[in-house]
């Protein structure tokens, strides 16, 4: 150390970790760009109904990307706002669970049935919220918009039901298609191994912040809250963000493209680098 240098000139441990968080953010953005570039999906030009389902899946992944950008923006600007990152990353995880549930079946007709269940659930939610708002005498309710949304979904349900009939699915089965299962059941259907427990735990941790559970708000009663090191709280939002978008993209590419090997080889070095940096920030002391 030179005579003009002092220990005060060196960055603190917190400052160093903030730089590492920024590095993770930059690496996740590289992943997102690869995800965007990978979605050159093969739309079957002669199958308009299948194109509807494919377009919906691609749109859901695009929505995931937008949500993750929100997490990264918070990480760049104010690490103390991590509760908002938890809430956003729960949405990212929920969409991943939904996409995997719809695309997991090997048989195409089963994926079509699950897509119809998804559409019926959308319709159910619109009807439910419409009834709820009308019961509250909300005068500014745009009935024309709600009606248009319902008609659009009903038309898509009819189209996909015709697609299902091409597979000689019985009319009795088609007339009794249910809404999608709850999230816990989707997780069970998606994963039969330790991954199921990992996702359930992640969802529980993220939900504490979405619902304002006591475990998430107790820290605000601490008079030393402002001196709290927020770094450790970023493990879940960052990990869930990049792992969820990768899982969604992999199954999307697997079902509707032939570029999965190329995609996996491109993301592998970035995932390794993210893992190394996160180990340094969140595991090493």
Image (cartoon, grey):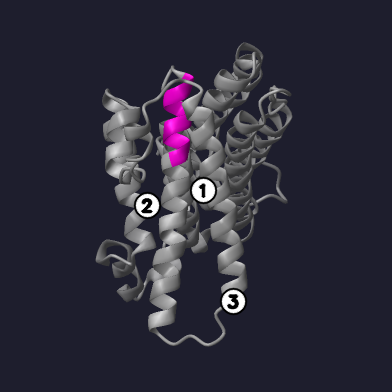
Q: Return the mark for residue 142.
A: 3
**Which of 164/34 is in front?**
164
Instruction: Between label 2 and label 3, give the one nearer the viewer.
Output: 3
SS for callout 2? helix
Q: According to the image, label 2 marks what residue?
A: 206
**Residue situated furthest front in the rendering:** 171
Q: Quadrant of residue 49?
A: top right
Mark nearer the N terminus (2 vs 3): 3
For the residue carrying disc 2, how many other residues have a C-alpha within 10 Å: few (<14), some (14-19), or many (20+)?
A: many
The residue identified by callout 1 is 13
Region of the chain picked out in magenta, as a range: 108-116
Query: Where does residue 87 sit, x and y in percent of width and height?
Result: 45, 57
Residue 219 in which image quadrant = bottom left
Residue toward you, 52 or 224: 52
Q: Is residue 114 magenta?
A: yes
Q: Is 44 left or right of 135, judged from the image as shown?
A: right
- The reply to whether residue 278 is in sight is yes
In the image, residue 100 lies in the stretch drawn in magenta:
no
For the residues labelled 1 and 2, the Cα–Cα distance comes to: 27 Å
In this view of the protein, can residue 235 be seen by the observer? no
Q: Is residue 2 left or right of residue 151?
A: right
Frontmost of labels 1 and 2 is: 2
Which secondary structure, mark 3?
Answer: loop
x and y, in percent, of residue 139 in the image: 53, 88
Is the Cβ of the residue at disc 2 closer than 8 Å to that at disc 3?
A: no
């Amino acid at each position: 150390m030179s005579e003009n240098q002092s220990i005060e000139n060196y960055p603190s441990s917190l400052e160093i970790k903030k730089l590492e968080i920024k590095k993770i953010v930059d690496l996740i953005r590289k992943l997102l760009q690869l995800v965007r570039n990978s979605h050159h999906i093969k739309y079957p030009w002669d199958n308009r109904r299948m194109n509807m389902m494919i377009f919906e899946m691609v749109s859901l992944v695009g929505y995931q990307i937008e949500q993750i950008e929100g997490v990264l923006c918070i990480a760049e600007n104010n690490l103390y706002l991590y509760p908002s990152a938890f809430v956003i990353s729960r949405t990212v995880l929920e969409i991943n669970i939904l996409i995997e549930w719809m695309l997991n079946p090997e048989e195409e007709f089963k994926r079509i049935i699950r897509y119809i269940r998804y559409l019926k659930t959308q319709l159910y939610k619109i009807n439910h919220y419409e009834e709820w708002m009308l019961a509250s005498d909300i005068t500014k309710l745009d009935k024309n918009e709600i009606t248009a949304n319902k008609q659009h979904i009903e038309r898509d349900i009819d189209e996909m039901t015709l697609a299902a009939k091409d597979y000689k699915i019985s009319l009795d089965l088609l007339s009794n298609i249910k809404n999608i299962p709850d999230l816990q059941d989707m997780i069970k259907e998606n994963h039969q191994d330790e991954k199921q427990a990992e996702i359930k735990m992640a969802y529980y941790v993220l939900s504490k912040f979405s619902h304002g559970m006591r475990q998430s708000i107790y820290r605000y009663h601490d008079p030393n809250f402002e001196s709290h090191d927020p770094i450790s709280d970023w493990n879940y939002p960052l990990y869930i963000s990049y792992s969820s978008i990768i899982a969604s993209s992999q199954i999307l590419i697997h079902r509707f493209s032939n570029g999965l090997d190329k995609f996996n080889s491109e993301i592998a070095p970035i995932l390794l680098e993210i893992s190394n940096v996160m180990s340094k920030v969140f595991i090493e002391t």
